[in-house]
Image (cartoon, helix red, strand yellow):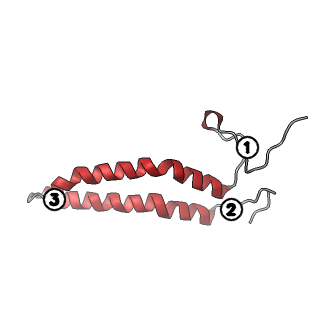
Amino acid sequence: MARTRSSQQYSSRKGYHLMTITSLRAIVEHQHSRFRPIVATGISIIAGNNPLEHSPSVRSCIAVLVTGGILSSLFLALVLVPIACMWFAPVKTPDGITA
């Protein structure tokens, strides 16, 4: 007889989930796996533009704009997108009932 798993349990063989999981847990796992690369990329771009921001050239204005854009995209990617996903995605309980 085949064994069944609840929706909370899953296998991550080859990176694919074999069983369904709740949307909230999927959002949390995705954010947990993407947090470090997103922040590391943002910090490296901001650190690279820092010398340009303090130079007396015309490029300092562009560096300030790029830094502001990177900071706003970090906020969007790490805060607003997960909130929007939780707001629009229906949350299913392990019983299969949409909450």
Contact, mark 3 vs mark 1 (Cβ under 8 Å) = no
Quarter of the image for residue 59 reads bottom left
- All told, the count of numbered labels is 3
The residue at 47%/52% (across/down) is: 35
| Label 3 packing within 10 angstroms: few (<14), some (14-19), many (20+) | some
Query: Which is more toward the observer, 89 or 42?
Result: 42
The residue at 42%/50% (across/down) is: 38
Contact, mark 1 vs mark 2 (Cβ under 8 Å) = no
Contact, mark 2 vs mark 3 (Cβ under 8 Å) = no
| Label 1 packing within 10 angstroms: few (<14), some (14-19), many (20+) | some
Could you tell me the amino acid type at mark 3? Ser
- Separation (CA) of disc 1 from disc 2: 17 Å
Q: Secondary structure at mark 2?
A: loop
N-term mark: 3 or 1: 1
N-term mark: 1 or 2: 1
> Relative to 56, is 10 above or below?
above
- Separation (CA) of disc 3 from disc 1: 51 Å
Q: Position of residue 88 (x, y in %)?
A: 62, 64
According to the picture, the residue beneath numbered tag 1 turns out to be 19
Pick the quarter of the image with the C terminus: bottom right
Q: Is residue 99 left or right of residue 85?
A: right
Q: Secondary structure at mark 3?
A: helix
Q: Say the numbered circle drawn on residue 60.
A: 3
Q: Position of residue 55 (x, y in %)?
A: 11, 57
According to the picture, the residue beneath numbered tag 2 turns out to be 90
Could you tell me the amino acid type at mark 1? Met
Q: Secondary structure at mark 1?
A: loop
Question: Residue reaching furthest right?
Answer: 1
| Label 2 packing within 10 angstroms: few (<14), some (14-19), many (20+) | some
N-term mark: 2 or 3: 3
